[in-house]
Image (spheres, rainbow, N blue to C red):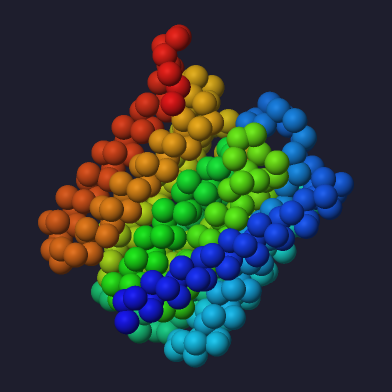
Amino acid sequence: MANSQFLLSLGVAVLSALLSMLAIKAIRPLMLRHALAQPNARSSHRVPTPQGAGIAVIAATLVVAGTVIVLTGMTGMQIPVTVFGATLFIAIVGLVDDVHSISVLPRLLLQGAAVAAIVFSAPDELRITPWLPLSIERAAILLAGLWFVNLVNFMDGLDLMTAAEAVPISVAIVLFGWLGDVPPPVTIVAAALCGALFGFVPFNRPVAKIFLGDVGSLPIGLLLGWCLLELAWQQKFAAALLLPLYYLADATLTLFRRIARHEPFWAAHRSHYYQRATDNGFTVWGVVGHVFLLNLFLASLAIASTRHQSTSAAILYVVAGAAAVFLVLYRFSSKRPRGTSSA
């Protein structure tokens, strides 16, 4: 059984990677003509670069995962169908925003509608905190989901950054699927997303030939958020917190710092820790290398937390993860001495 799960997940990832790679090659000339991201003072790139590779990444993920889920007759189809529909919707919102900028409030409302479709279509028995009224819990999940979708978008500002974050998370979700901690459709979607991102990597490695764009980062955030929510619904809350902890910390601390300084926190900026790292002497490879290795460590802690069924152990793993994240953020925010390696 375990061997068949491994082969199925591997096949899904490989097929999704090939489809994503071929689709990116096909659409890149079109994006060069119609979706160029122009560099500005807040950008990490220096030359006009096409965006929109997210079209290929999301298409490959949904086509491969959807086909496999249907052909294998996996149970629990209601939520995946809703997730796929919400993902397509938020991808369209992102594509429109890439081509013709949408103002903040309509953009948030549209994103909130996609998150709400997933949250409020879930069966009532799926609970994280049974002692809270269902309406309050679902409202809290909606707000958290909206923030997560946006923070993934905010953090997609450096070559390979999203891959360095999402690949370890999706691989961990696949492992949780093999361990029986998330439903099979979640495992398949995570494997497909992982593969699609691998197909994107050759085009996004420094110096990037194409970016994801909002059409990619927003739905990737939605899919990852759903996978983490499914993990939390299985009472694996420490694991669901540990996996995205670097993104949560960098984006949330940056938001609070900008609010405290009375800055327009909704506007584009270069205040994230990973952006400050490049300003402080780190190379792009150095930054994404730190993030990738940190996420591998966080994933190992997340998996370990599900094998020890005690509150004290879960707290210990979360504290260890938080300490590792703090060390990386501190390193990113510190200037590199002249003449030292920035890797």
Task: Give the camera-side residue of 318 and 122.
Answer: 318
Q: Is residue 326 left or right of residue 117?
A: left
Looking at the image, is 179 positioned above or below residue 287?
below
Q: Position of residue 252 (x, y in %)?
A: 44, 43
Residue 75 seen anywhere in this rendered image of the structure: yes
As drawn, 85 above or below 47: below
Q: Residue at x 41, y 60 (%)?
A: 171
Residue 341 in percent (x, y) is at 43, 18
- x, y (%) of residue 244? 40, 52
Residue sitting nearer the eye, 132 or 243: 243
- Judged left or right of residue 209, residue 151 is left
Q: In terms of depth relative to the viewer, which is nearer, 342 or 39? A: 342
Q: Quadrant of the N terminus?
A: bottom left
**Residue 248: horizontal and vertical position, in percent?**
42, 47
- Residue that protrudes farthest toward the top in the picture: 338
Q: Quadrant of residue 240?
A: bottom left
**Apparent side of residue 18 relative to residue 163 in the rendered image (left or right):** right
The answer to whether residue 326 is above or below residue 214 is above
Tell me if I can see residue 93 in this picture. Answer: no
| Residue drawn where x is 63% and y is 31% of the image | 44
Q: Residue at x 37, y 47 (%)?
A: 295
Q: Looking at the image, which is closer to me, 338 or 150?
A: 338
Residue at the spot 23% in from the left edge and 64% down from the top edge: 306
Q: Is residue 129 above or below residue 277?
A: below
Apparent side of residue 158 relative to residue 89 in the rendered image (left or right) = left
Q: Quadrant of the C terminus?
A: top left
> Total marks drawn?
0
